[in-house]
Each structure stands twice: as C-alpha cells, then as structure tokens.
C-alpha cells in the first residue's frame, strides 16, 4: 500500500477508534489497518480510506479505496448496501416515512407526543413548507392545531428511491387515518406501497375505525402482503381500538401499547393480533410506567403465542432496576441489556425483542427486475 501523508481534518483521534486500535493484540509498533469514511465540506461523496496505524492509533499512511454519494436522491446512495441498516431511533423499525403530516389530540397518550415538538422544530427551522401551521404554542409548549396535509413530493416518493428492502414505520409525524386526511393522499401513498413489495410498511394509528372505512372503499389495497396495520393503546379506556383493529383487512395487525400510562390488563384479547409492542413514555414530562403493567401484557402474549417486543422504560427513573432493586440510574445503565434504549429495556433479566415471523430489522435486498 502506497503511503501518503493523511489529509487534514480526518478524525484519527476519535476515542472509539483509538480504543479499537489499542485493544488490538500484537507487538508495539505493529501496523494495523482501519477503513473509515470521511467527507470534506463542499464534497458530495463519502471517501473510504484504508488507514495504516500503529497500536497507539498514530496514522502512518493511507490509500483511497472507494467513494459513495451523499446525495439524498437516486440509486448511487444505495449502491454499496446489501440491505437497509436501521436509520431510526425507534427500535422496532428500520426507517420512517411521512407521506402525510399534521394531526390532532385523540386521547391522553397524545399529551406529550414527540411529533408535536419535532413538527414545531421543523417549521421553526424552515426545513419543509409542508409543516407550516401544524403546531402552535400553548403555555410555551407545541400543540397540534389540527391542520393536516400531504408532504412534499420528495417525502411522498421516498420509498421509490430505496432499492434495499426496508421496514418503514409509516407516519411517525402524523396519523395516516386522521379523519381530515384526503383519501387521494392516502391513495397516492398506498400506490407507492403497492409498487414496492420488497419493503414492509408498518402503519400505526389511533383511529383504526377510519382504517376500516377507508379500506372498505379500496379493495385493491386491502391485505397487501407488505402492509401491516397497527393501533396504539395506552390504557384500558382505549382497548376498544383492539376490537376495531380486528376488523381492518391487513396482512398483519399489531398493537403499540405505548406510551403505557396506565394498566390495560390483566385480561387482554389479542385474538387476530400478530404482534404487540410495549414501551414507557420518554421526555421531561414523562408519566411513569409500572413493571406489572408490562408483565401483564407480556404474559398474555406468551400464553397466546403472539410475538412480544418491549421497546423501552422511557426514563431510568422508571426502570425496575431502579424502582425495585434500588440501583442508581448510572448503575442501572451498566446492568441493563440495552442501555441505549431510553431508560433501558431489560424485562425480568432479558430483552424481549420478538418480531413477526422472525422478520429481521436488516431485511432482504430487493429482487432485481
């Protein structure tokens, strides 16, 4: 490998990289290789460089080994990917897709909705004209105005530019089945889902009764094999949504029992449901979640053979290692099996991260056609 002086600005002193080099076994001064991506201001590409370093992390030389486009559209961005890696902070999906925007409060689970804060931030930064007027400040906090609309063309067509099979959470910033959404907007999104069978779409709503009505008028979209329909249920008073969800024609129906702000058990009817997610509320105003509430949902799923996914406790102060075992949040973060989840995610000594039909979150590549 030809050795050249490394270009200025490369992050050789990154603590993570230094730790990796220092952990490498071998004699002092022995060269080790690391391939890293970097890009410079004004450059439209990631350049992959192979670095030759000694064990202390000091760079001895480098060579270029390839590049990948940073452009947000087109196939070049995906040319080096065998599958879609998870780009979302949401543990149960690969990525989010928001073809529709805007919402209104439907039940107490909406009170601290992160999407309201995010929509307000997007509007304030002028990032997308579609978010203008979606929120207003009430007592200093963003709240939905009730205005809804179609996203930009680029946002609407996002899945069409993704060649690698991806699990998309649909409308993390809205409710796809909000009563004020135009059927024409839904039709456009559904046509895209139909045209991309290599993707899996997770459509989550607090209004499953609207989904029943809409799909009753759209036979061509009913039971698409790559579309899942889910309902949010945050407390016992909203369990009627489970009954409504059972009437929705879908390849798979799932429940998002988050934010779990009150007990919904001990008896929950999960017949006709193919997947259940639980999670505590996050954020500064998060309401507590109780270990027993989660256990009741899990036990029903285990008894009925329904895949169960516990996402998070929401805050370390709600984690059972703190509440029940008396650990400090710092100690709990060291012992929890997923310290990167908000508040951790360990439940009775293990992680519950089951997916329907063992669907991985790094799914198959789209077939070449």
Image (cartoon, rainbow, N blue to C red):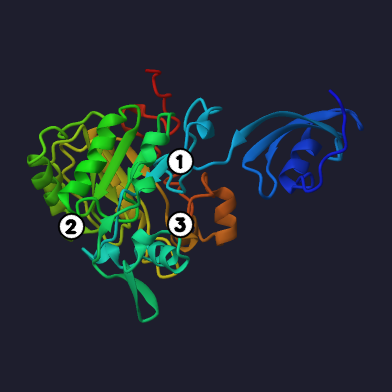
Between the residue at mark 3 and the residue at mark 2, the CA separation in whole angstroms equals: 24 Å
Q: Quadrant of the N terminus?
A: top right
Residue that carries the numbered disc 2 in the rendered image:
238
User: Going by the picture, which residue comes out furthest to the bottom?
Assistant: 139
Closest to the observer, 339 or 129: 129
Between the residue at mark 1 and the residue at mark 3, the CA separation in whole angstroms equals: 13 Å
Between the residue at mark 1 and the residue at mark 2, the CA separation in whole angstroms equals: 28 Å
Closest to the observer, 126 or 231: 126
Q: Which mark is residue 350?
A: 1
Q: Which mark is residue 82?
A: none
Q: Which mark is residue 319?
A: 3
> Along the polypeptide, which appears first: circle 1 or circle 2?
2
Secondary structure at badge 1 equals loop
At a point 21% along the width and 51% down the height, the residue shown is 266
Count neighbours of disc 1 (C-alpha within 10 A) and say few if under 14, some if 14 to 19, many if 20 or more: few
Q: Are discs 1 and 2 less than 8 Å apart at CB? A: no
Q: Is residue 18 above or below residue 317?
A: above
Q: Is residue 172 above or below residue 298?
A: below
Count neighbours of disc 2 (C-alpha within 10 A) and say few if under 14, some if 14 to 19, many if 20 or more: some
Residue 162 position within the rendered picture, expressed as x and y whole percent measured from the top left: 42, 34
Q: Kindly indicate the quadrant of the structure image that contains residue 234.
A: bottom left
């Amino acid at each position: 490998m030809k050795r050249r002086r490394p270009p200025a600005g490369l992050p050789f002193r990154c603590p993570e990289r230094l730790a990796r080099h220092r952990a490498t076994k071998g004699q002092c001064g022995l060269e080790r290789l690391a391939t890293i991506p970097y890009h410079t201001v004004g450059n439209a590409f990631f350049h992959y460089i192979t670095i030759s370093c000694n064990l202390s992390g000091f760079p001895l030389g480098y060579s270029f080994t390839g590049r990948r486009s940073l452009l947000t559209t087109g196939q070049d961005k995906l040319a080096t990917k065998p599958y879609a890696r998870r780009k979302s902070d949401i543990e149960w999906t690969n990525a989010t897709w928001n073809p529709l925007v805007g919402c209104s409060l439907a039940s107490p689970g909406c009170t601290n909705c992160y999407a309201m804060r995010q929509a307000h931030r997007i509007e304030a930064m002028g990032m997308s004209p579609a978010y203008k007027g979606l929120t207003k400040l009430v007592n200093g906090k963003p709240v939905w105005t009730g205005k809804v609309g179609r996203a930009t063309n680029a946002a609407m067509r996002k899945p069409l530019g993704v060649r690698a099979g991806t699990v998309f959470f649909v409308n993390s910033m809205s409710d796809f089945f909000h009563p004020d959404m135009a059927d024409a907007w839904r039709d456009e999104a559904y046509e895209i889902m139909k045209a991309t069978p290599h993707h899996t779409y997770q459509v989550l709503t607090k209004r499953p009764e609207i989904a029943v009505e809409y799909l009753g008028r759209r036979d061509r979209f009913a039971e698409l094999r790559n579309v899942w329909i889910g309902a949010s249920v945050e407390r016992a008073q909203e369990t009627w949504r489970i009954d409504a969800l059972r009437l929705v024609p879908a390849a798979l129906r799932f429940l998002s029992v988050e934010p779990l702000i009150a007990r919904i058990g001990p008896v929950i009817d999960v017949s006709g449901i193919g997947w259940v997610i639980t999670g505590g509320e996050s954020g500064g105003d998060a309401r507590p979640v109780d270990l027993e509430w989660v256990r009741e949902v899990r036990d029903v799923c285990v008894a009925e053979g329904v895949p169960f996914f516990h996402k998070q406790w929401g805050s370390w102060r709600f984690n059972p290692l703190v509440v029940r075992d008396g650990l400090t949040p710092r100690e709990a973060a060291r012992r929890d099996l997923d310290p990167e989840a908000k508040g951790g995610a360990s439940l009775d000594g293990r992680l519950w991260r089951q997916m329907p039909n063992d669907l991985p979150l790094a799914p198959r590549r789209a077939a070449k056609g």
